[in-house]
Image: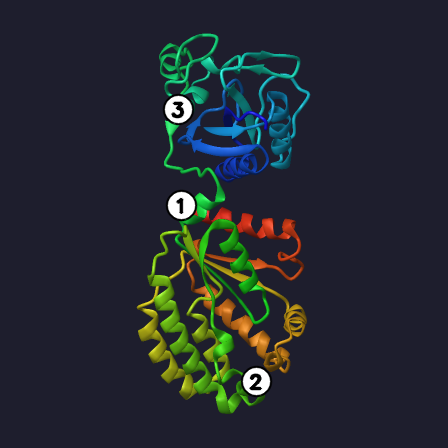
């Protein structure tokens, strides 16, 4: 088994969505290089050595089995994936991401590709300050001084401001701070599949709608006008009871909650299926209940075209769903979009998954997770 080494990586960005890019770099390091065990605070400073936009800078500790040169190769791949284009011009330039190896254990390395410790770290306050957050007493193996002493002796007098931004070592830590994510969508959109995958990958308590047990549902699809009101009242009572129970009980062994529905869907479906007087009565009862239930911190709506919804419904083969009409699905979609118009934008996310297969295609799944991740980062910063 290869030996695990503590490597300290300096991270900087002054182009694009700087915080998002730094956070994504950390997640890619966790995925491709090793376990990220500590993240510094985020600092902002003017461009160093050239005229450009301000940088955000941070430092992380990663436990890796990669050799120093292999580690460098992987960092360069991550830079490229995140849009960095290295120029042949001399001198410093703006960049979407900059990943530098500061220390690799206590190793001293000098070859054509790499010098460790980083030869200029003692001259750069934007490297030393973040490093001091996670390794204040780490001794430079050549200079034989710890990070705090290096800061005291550093001649770099650049302005450096500690920001209020928070970085996360991995996505599980990030999502755990959201507390509750709701995955919503039309019939056949894939909300249960996505919620289940998220719960498995990020240690979340899974809250699933018990729709299959509703005795009115098969009859409703045969005769909507007759069974609409008892169906919607039955759904509301069941959702309220289940939602209240499941979201109020904290699971000590889970990091957060993810559901495949939000109780507000009851009002959306009721508006489509009920007569006006029935809906007004239903709305009064609903509003009373809705005040009492937990609201998701992140509300994700999976949009699928009506054609794709019908394909998915046919594929999963539930007998009572096979007669669902196109017009009904389109009304449900419109109902959700009307609801989202009044929902706080900082808490909601619409993802078009019509051309995605996030169940079988990991790239599609990762793209969805990245969108949810970015909204979570914005919320928490």
* Residue sitting farthest toward the top: 143
Callout 3: 10 Å neighbours few (<14), some, many (20+)? some
Indicate the position of residue 246 as horizontal and vertical percent values. Answer: 38, 64
Q: Residue at x 44, y 81 (%)?
A: 232
Determine which residue is flagged by label 2: 221
Report whether 317 appears left or right of 99.
Answer: right
Q: Secondary structure at mark 1?
A: helix
Q: Mark number for residue 302?
A: none
Around disc 2, counting alpha carbons within 10 Å, would you say few (fewer than 14), some (14 to 19), or many (20 or more)? some
Q: Which sits earlier in the primary sequence, circle 1 or circle 3?
A: 3
In the image, residue 116 lies at what x, y percent? 55, 15
Tell me the mark number nearer the camera, choosing from 2 and 1.
2
Camera-side residue of 262 and 57: 262
Q: Secondary structure at mark 2?
A: helix
- Residue 83 vertical placement versus 188 (above, below): above
State which mark lies toward you, 2 or 3. 2
Q: Which residue is mark 3?
A: 160
Q: In this picture, is 118 found above or below 52? A: above
Residue 297 image offset from top left, x and y in percent: 40, 56
At numbered mark 3, what does the secondary structure look like: helix, strand or loop? loop
């Amino acid at each position: 088994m290869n030996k695990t080494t503590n490597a300290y990586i300096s991270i900087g960005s002054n182009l694009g969505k700087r915080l998002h890019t730094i956070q994504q770099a950390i997640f890619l390091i966790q995925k491709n290089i090793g376990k990220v065990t500590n993240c510094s605070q985020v600092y902002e400073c003017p461009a160093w050595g050239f005229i450009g936009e301000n940088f955000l800078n941070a430092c992380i500790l990663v436990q890796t089995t990669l050799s120093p040169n292999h580690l460098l190769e992987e960092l360069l791949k991550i830079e490229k994936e995140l849009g960095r284009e290295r120029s042949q011009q001399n001198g410093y330039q703006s960049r979407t991401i900059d990943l530098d190896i500061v220390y690799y254990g206590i190793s001293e390395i000098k070859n054509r590709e790499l010098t460790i410790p980083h030869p200029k770290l003692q001259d750069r306050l934007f490297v030393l300050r973040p490093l001091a957050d996670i390794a204040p007493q780490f001794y430079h193996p050549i200079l034989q001084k710890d990070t705090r002493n290096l800061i005291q002796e550093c001649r770099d007098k650049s302005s450096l401001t500690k920001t209020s931004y928070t970085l996360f070592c991995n996505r599980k830590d990030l999502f755990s701070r959201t507390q509750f994510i709701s995955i919503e969508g039309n019939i056949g959109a894939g909300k249960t599949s996505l919620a289940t995958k998220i719960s498995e990958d990020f240690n979340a308590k899974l809250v699933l709608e018990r729709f299959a047990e509703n005795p009115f549902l098969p009859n409703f699809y045969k005769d909507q006008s007759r069974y609409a009101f008892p169906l919607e009242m039955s759904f509301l009572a069941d959702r309220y009871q289940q939602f209240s129970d499941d979201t109020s009980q904290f699971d000590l062994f889970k990091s957060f909650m993810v559901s495949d529905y939000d109780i507000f869907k009851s009002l959306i479906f009721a508006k489509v299926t009920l007569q006006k007087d029935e809906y007004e009565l239903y709305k009064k009862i609903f509003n009373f209940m809705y005040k009492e239930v937990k609201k998701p911190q992140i509300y994700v709506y999976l949009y699928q075209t009506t054609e794709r919804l019908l394909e998915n419904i046919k594929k999963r083969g539930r007998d009572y769903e096979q007669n669902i009409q196109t017009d009904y699905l389109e009304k449900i979609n419109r109902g959700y979009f009307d609801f989202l118009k009044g929902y706080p934008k900082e808490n909601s996310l619409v993802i078009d998954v019509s051309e995605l297969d996030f169940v079988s295609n990991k790239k599609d799944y990762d793209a969805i997770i990245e969108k949810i991740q970015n909204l979570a980062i914005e919320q928490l910063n």
